[in-house]
Amino acid sequence: MRQKIVAGNWTLNKNVAETKSLIADLKAQTNTSGARVIITPSFVNLTTAVEAVAGSNIEVAAQNMSQHDSGAYTGETSADMLKSAGVNITLLGHSERRAYYGETDALLAEKVDKALAENIEVIFCFGEELEERKSGKHFDVVASQISNALFHLGADAFKNIILAYEPVWAIGTGETASADQAQEMHAFIRKTLADKYSADLADSVSILYGGSCKPTNAQEIFSKTDVDGGLIGGAALKAEDFFGIINANK
Ligand code: 13P
């Protein structure tokens, strides 16, 4: 079901004490929007975070997950490990994973399959680079990122998938996509889903925008018909800013 969602991607930030402190600050804020609130602390702090969010509506997600169940895969974290820590949601395909760690569409398809098989909800991230937008290829790039990693799935799988459109040129740059650019791409994503599956399915999937989202620009972006919320980086690291964005998602 399509939902309002604001997710904070903490990336490589916050040690144990800082994780506890930010969550305490988040719990002191009031969510007047009714949106789902999700945070993604680092792996080492997931257990701390799950304990710290108790008694609130804040959900804890991982930033990544292995496609393997177990074995000699140094540095990896499995679906079972996440679930045993009380984590039932993961980001997959963030542009930083694609760019710095060589994650391909084919690998992401495997990770998506593993997560869904283990009942882990996926926030699937994708988006074009600056050169791709400048050369007018952004729609093709996004369509292929989505189809390569997701279009082998049956329609039912999308009940456990949230999409996050994050144009790479807007991530951490201060240059956000305009609300109209976000809407244009989100409408295109919904049409791509409708063409492959059905209009009903396309209308049931939550699609988040990410990239330099701030309390000052969130309301305009979230007001667009096909934007269901945001995936927030830098502004998710301060409780007031993050809740400014959450409460803009009316
Ligand atoms: P910023 O909000 O810092 O641009 O980061 C967006 C992002 O990549 C969240 O995953």
Image: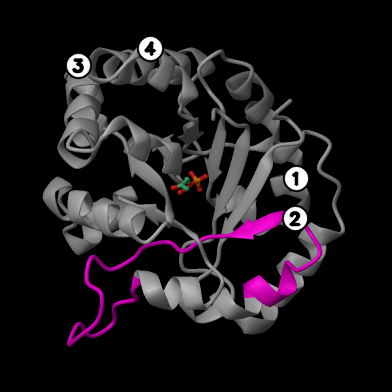
Give yes or no for contact between labels 4 and 3 (Cβ–Cβ under 8 Å). no
Position of 30 relative to 81 (above/below): above
Q: Are marks 1 and 3 in contact (CB under 8 Å)?
A: no
SS for dot 3? loop
Please name the residue that numbered disc 1 is placed on.
243
Q: Position of residue 46 (x, y in %)?
A: 55, 74
Q: CA distance from mark 4 to mark 3?
A: 26 Å
Residue 136's disc number: 3
Q: Which residue is denoted by mark 2 in the rendering?
A: 239
**Disc 4 vs disc 1: Cβ atoms closer than 8 Å?**
no
Q: Tell me what residue is drawn at x 17 percent, y 87 percent.
A: 72
* Mark closer to the observer (2, 4): 4
Of badges 1 and 3, nearer the viewer stands 1
| Residue 199's disc number | 4
Label 2: state its secondary structure: helix
Q: Of marks 4 and 1, which one's residue comes earlier in the chain?
A: 4
Residue 184 lies, in percent from the top left, at 40, 12
What amino acid is found at the position of numbered circle 2 in the picture? Answer: Ala
Task: Name which quarter of the figure residue 192 lies in.
Answer: top left
In the image, the segment drawn in magenta is: 49-78
| Residue depicted at 57% across the width and 47% down the height | 7
Q: Residues within 10 Å of mark 3 (few under 14, many from 20)?
A: few
Tell me: is circle 1 under 8 Å from ligand 1. Answer: no
Q: Earlier in the sequence, mark 4 or mark 3?
A: 3
| Marks 3 and 2 in Cβ contact (< 8 Å) | no
Q: Amino acid at mark 1?
A: Phe
Report whether 61 appears left or right of 115: right
Q: Earlier in the sequence, mark 1 or mark 3?
A: 3
Identify residue type, mark 3. Gly
User: Which sits in the foreground, 17 or 143?
Assistant: 143
